[in-house]
């Protein structure tokens, strides 16, 4: 038999070689990935990102306004001041201290006629806002910093009902001076318990003339409206590129990726939404949010921040008044192309989405909004009144107070009551402040509920002097979050804000908790945690609760849970004040005085920790006064000594407050 020309091994090797050649050719003709990798490997320039000095030089700016803002007000004021600069022949920019290297403050003297303005809000118990924390740390740590070439001024935002009124603004003002900087105008103090807007306007009216005098410049006399953004409509855009309510990344609500924070909230399904009160005309509610699989961790005492949406009826009404198609897809683009803030809210989006998710349409507008909108009022009398309300004259301030603030007129009410005022909707969207997250004390313990966060809140709804019904944005939105809505799970965009409101490190320390109304929220978490510790066999100190409500049969919140905690020994003592169940009103501070001997023993000899949660304006002050009385009476102290005694407890972290006004 004749042998074949090629053996099977030859054929195999030949096929393999041909295959390798084809493979090499196919891959050789794929150059596309190369530029992709080149793009990724090229390091992005960092100088411009963190150097505000280089940015100011490049853009010809000489005034920079830094803001420490938690709810957006300080940022709003900073934007107004940077805009003002133009009227004085200067150029300003607003800046988030978190985005820049604050060590460059010493270099500001490289720019002629330069000035740094700081709009600093105080958060909680004298703390810096989240975005100013690094700046605060830098100021504390850099004693050898020389800021002798820095001109500065500070406007502080705070609330007089809080113990540490305007602590952050005062600290920045004092610290910059200590480091050699030159204060060119007095510290401004804004009080949100009074009229923050009026405080700011009054300070600003005196501030700019002082700046002109210091730098030898004159106002240009140009009081016309200065637009910061220009409108662009997108008639043919791919709707996949349009924001539908996301806070940060486009489509972040469709593809959720941890970590979750203020720019990337988690969509937590609502698993429980029940009414807590048995009667009365209010609606108090308990919600439970499922955080399974989110990797979110929390501690008892932390806050949950939720991003609400505006009432659809209010949004629709605004569209009707202004006669616009709310489904128009738009972008508002910053006229200053070098600005870090390209848009006032995520763009492109629709007017409907902007007014629902991104803009605050329920708070009474500030005076700067009225001033800029006045130009669109065709009735001379209406225009005059709007300009008057935006002025710093006593008559104007009184008119703004009575017609806008006291009457609780939001932008919809203002447009309804001023028929000649019909501004372009894009300018209105530019002027309205951002809709902010709302914070609630978490009413659960992660030890007992690791995959669930509980919220306790009262629905805000009231009648205004004009006869309108105003509804709280977040609480009404939460109230309507039924567990399943047409087969879909209701979700709440949320993230956690850490708090200093913490149980003592030693479980053996006694705790005294005072929380009337929804102020009970964090204490439900504390009680759950103390119960869990007991179950683990740990020795737990006395746990005393002071709760207050109006009527036992109406709004005794968590009655069953509290009474069960007392019966099984988790709560050592439960004290409840029903303020309106008898002729004379009884509040928690009255019960504190009634039990002064046992309280003084816990505080003075057993190292007890005191916690207060709820209303700052009245309750927290009255409770503090009661503790002053107890220390004075049973500690044989003068009033000054008693006050100092309680202050020392605060300094040691043994007297903590989680309060709001």
Image: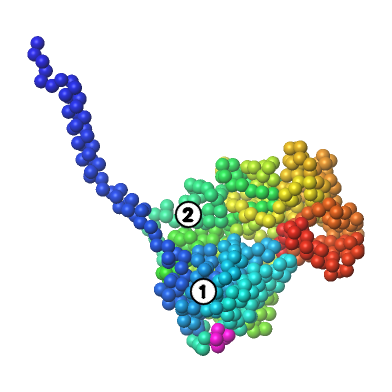
Viewer-proximal residue, 654 or 342? 654
In the picture, residue 421 is in which quadrant? bottom right
Residue topped by disc 1:
106
The location of residue 143, given as percent across then percent down, is 59, 69
Check the image and report above or below for 69 versus 577: below
Please, is residue 657 above or below residue 380 in the view?
A: above
Write down the quadrant of residue 514 in the picture: bottom right
**Name of the residue lying farthest toward the front:** 144
* Label 2 element class: loop
Majority secondary structure in the magenta region: helix
Label 2: which residue?
Answer: 249
Q: How many marks?
A: 2
Magenta residues, start to end: 209-214
Relative to residue 368, is residue 256 depicted above or below?
Answer: above
Crowd tier of the residue under label 1, counting other residues whose Cα lies within 10 Å: few below 14, some 14–19, many 20 or above: some
Specify whether residue 111 is in view. yes
Q: Nearer the viewer, mark 2 or mark 1?
A: 1
């Amino acid at each position: 038999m004749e042998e074949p020309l090629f053996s099977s091994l030859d054929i195999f090797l030949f096929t393999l070689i041909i295959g390798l050649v084809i493979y090499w050719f196919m891959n050789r003709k794929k150059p596309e990935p190369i530029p992709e990798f080149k793009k990724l490997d090229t390091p992005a320039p960092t100088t411009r990102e963190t150097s505000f000095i280089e940015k100011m030089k490049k853009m010809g700016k000489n005034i920079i306004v830094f803001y420490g803002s938690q709810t957006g007000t300080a940022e709003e004021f900073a934007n107004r001041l940077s805009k003002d600069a133009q009227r004085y022949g200067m150029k300003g920019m607003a800046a988030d201290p978190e985005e820049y290297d604050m060590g460059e403050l010493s270099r500001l003297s490289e720019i002629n006629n330069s000035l740094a303005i700081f709009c600093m809000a105080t958060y909680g118990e004298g703390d810096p806002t989240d975005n100013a924390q690094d700046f605060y740390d830098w100021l504390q740590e850099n004693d050898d910093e020389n800021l002798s070439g820095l001109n500065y001024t500070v406007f502080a935002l705070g609330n007089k009902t809080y113990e540490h009124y305007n602590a952050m603004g005062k600290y920045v003002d004092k610290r910059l001076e200590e480091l050699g900087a030159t204060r060119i105008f007095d510290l401004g103090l804004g009080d949100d318990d009074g009229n923050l807007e009026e405080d700011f306007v009054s300070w600003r009216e005196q501030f700019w003339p002082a700046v002109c005098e210091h730098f030898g410049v004159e106002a240009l006399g140009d009081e016309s409206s200065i637009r910061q953004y220009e409108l662009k409509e997108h008639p043919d855009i791919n709707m996949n590129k349009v924001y539908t309510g996301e806070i940060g990344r486009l489509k972040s609500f469709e593809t959720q990726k941890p970590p979750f924070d203020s720019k990337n909230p988690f969509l937590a399904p609502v698993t429980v939404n029940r009414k807590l009160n048995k009667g009365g005309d209010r609606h108090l509610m308990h919600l439970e949010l499922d955080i399974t699989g989110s990797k979110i961790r929390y501690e008892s005492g932390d806050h949950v921040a939720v991003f609400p949406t505006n009432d659809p009826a209010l949004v629709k009404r605004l569209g009707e008044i202004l006669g616009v198609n709310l489904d128009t897809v738009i972008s508002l683009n910053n006229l200053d192309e070098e600005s870090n803030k390209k848009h006032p809210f995520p763009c492109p989006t629709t007017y409907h989405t902007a007014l629902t998710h991104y803009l605050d349409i329920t708070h009474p507008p500030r005076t700067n909004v009225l001033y800029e909108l006045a130009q669109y009022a065709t009735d001379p009398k209406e225009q005059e009144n709007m300009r008057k309300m935006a002025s710093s004259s006593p008559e104007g301030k009184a008119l703004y107070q009575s017609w806008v603030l006291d009457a609780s007129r939001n932008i919809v009410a203002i447009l309804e009551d001023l028929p000649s005022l019909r501004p372009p909707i894009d300018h209105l969207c530019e002027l309205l402040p951002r809709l902010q997250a709302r914070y609630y004390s978490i009413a659960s313990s992660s030890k007992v509920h690791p995959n669930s966060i509980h919220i306790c809140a009262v629905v805000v709804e009231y009648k205004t002097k004009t006869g309108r019904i105003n509804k709280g944005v977040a609480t009404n939105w939460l109230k309507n979050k039924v567990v399943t809505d047409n087969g879909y799970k209701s979700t709440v965009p949320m993230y956690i804000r850490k708090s200093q409101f913490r149980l003592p490190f030693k479980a053996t320390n006694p705790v005294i908790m005072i929380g009337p109304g929804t102020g009970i929220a964090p204490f439900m978490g504390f009680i759950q945690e103390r119960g869990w510790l007991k179950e683990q066999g740990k020795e737990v100190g006395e746990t005393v609760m002071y709760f207050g409500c109006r009527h036992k049969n109406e709004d005794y919140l968590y009655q069953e849970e509290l009474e069960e905690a007392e019966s099984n020994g988790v709560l050592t003592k439960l004290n409840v004040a029903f303020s309106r169940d008898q002729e004379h009103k009884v509040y928690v501070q009255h019960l504190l005085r009634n039990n002064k001997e046992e309280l003084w023993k816990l505080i003075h000899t057993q190292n007890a920790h005191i916690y207060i949660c709820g209303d700052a304006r009245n309750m927290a002050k009255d409770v503090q006064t009661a503790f002053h009385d107890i220390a004075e009476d049973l500690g044989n102290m003068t009033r000054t000594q008693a006050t100092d005694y309680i202050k020392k407890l605060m300094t040691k972290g043994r007297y903590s407050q989680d309060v709001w006004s």
